[in-house]
């Protein structure tokens, strides 16, 4: 872990953009197209829970409290080195945590559609992705081209295929 932290510090010091994320719903292709590095902010460790419980309700899950506690105590270098946080509304507890994280660091919250196949779900998700694109552009003062998005999608799809091919080896 220490090596990962030191590598991230060096990356940040080199001027690289860093976006902290929480969930697999993150459209990492947009983060890539913004020439940024996505890092996971989900934390572990019981020592991060008590500081979180000073702000968050105690009945939230340990993952949420450990993540928030790591952020507010600066024990999570991934949060510390993130320029902004990209979050998704996967549960009510995370929504509450994002409210508080937004007071510490720029936080973009993507609303998930209320179902995968419901009427309008794809259009809703597309509007959320477009809002993220605008926020990344405004936050970083850049323009994300359609070509950059296309390249990022192709790269992430190749990565996904390589992972699936790897899993097939063990089947």
Image (spheres, grey):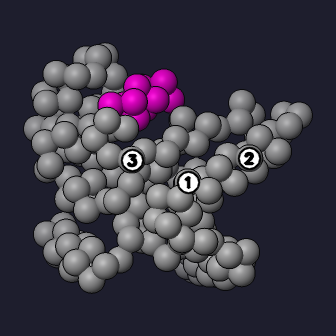
Is residue 95 covered in magenta? yes
- The quarter of the displayed image where residue 54 is located: top left
Position of the C terminus, as image quadrant, is bottom right
**Which residue is rendered at x = 13% and y = 69% of the image?**
2
Please tell me whether residue 25 is drawn above or below residue 29 in the rendered image.
above
| Residue at mark 1 to residue at mark 3: CA–CA distance | 10 Å
Residue under circle 3? 106
Q: Is residue 99 left or right of residue 2?
A: right
Label 2 packing within 10 angstroms: few (<14), some (14-19), many (20+):
some
| Residue at mark 1 to residue at mark 2: CA–CA distance | 12 Å
Q: Residue 81 in the image: state x and y as whole percent.
A: 25, 62
Question: Reading the chain from its start, which is encountered first: label 1 or label 3?
Answer: 3
Judging from the image, what secondary structure is the residue with disc 3 in? loop
Residue under circle 1? 135
Q: Can residue 42 be seen by looking at this rendering? A: no
Question: Reading the chain from its start, which is encountered first: label 3 or label 2?
Answer: 3
Q: Residue 110 in the image: state x and y as whole percent.
A: 58, 42
| Residue at mark 3 to residue at mark 2: CA–CA distance | 20 Å
Label 1 packing within 10 angstroms: few (<14), some (14-19), many (20+):
some
Q: Closer to the observer: label 1 or label 2? A: 1
The residues colored magenta run: 91-100
Judging from the image, what secondary structure is the residue with disc 2 in? helix
Q: Closer to the observer: label 3 or label 2? A: 3
Q: Residue 77 in the image: state x and y as whole percent.
A: 20, 59
**Which residue is rendered at x = 41% and y = 61% of the image?**
19
**Which residue is rendered at x = 10% and y = 38% of the image?**
47
- The quarter of the displayed image where residue 137 is located: bottom right
Callouts 3 and 2 close, C-beta under 8 Å: no
Which mark, by number, is residue 127? 2
Q: Is residue 109 left or right of residue 129?
A: left
């Amino acid at each position: 872990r220490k090596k990962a932290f030191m590598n991230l510090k060096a990356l940040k010091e080199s001027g690289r953009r860093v976006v902290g994320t929480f969930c697999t719903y993150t459209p990492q292709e947009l983060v890539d197209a913004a020439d940024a590095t996505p890092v996971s902010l989900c934390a572990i460790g019981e020592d991060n829970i008590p500081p979180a419980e000073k702000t968050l309700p105690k009945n939230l899950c340990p993952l949420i409290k450990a993540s928030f506690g790591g952020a507010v105590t600066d024990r999570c270098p991934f949060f510390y080195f993130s320029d902004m946080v990209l979050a998704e509304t996967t549960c009510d507890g995370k929504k509450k945590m994002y409210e508080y994280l937004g007071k510490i660091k720029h936080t973009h919250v993507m609303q998930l559609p209320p179902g995968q196949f419901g009427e309008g779900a794809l259009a809703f998700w597309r509007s959320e992705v477009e809002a993220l694109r605008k926020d990344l552009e405004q936050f970083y003062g850049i323009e994300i081209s359609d070509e950059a998005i296309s390249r990022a999608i192709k790269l992430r799809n190749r990565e996904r295929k390589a992972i699936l091919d790897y899993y097939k080896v063990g089947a």
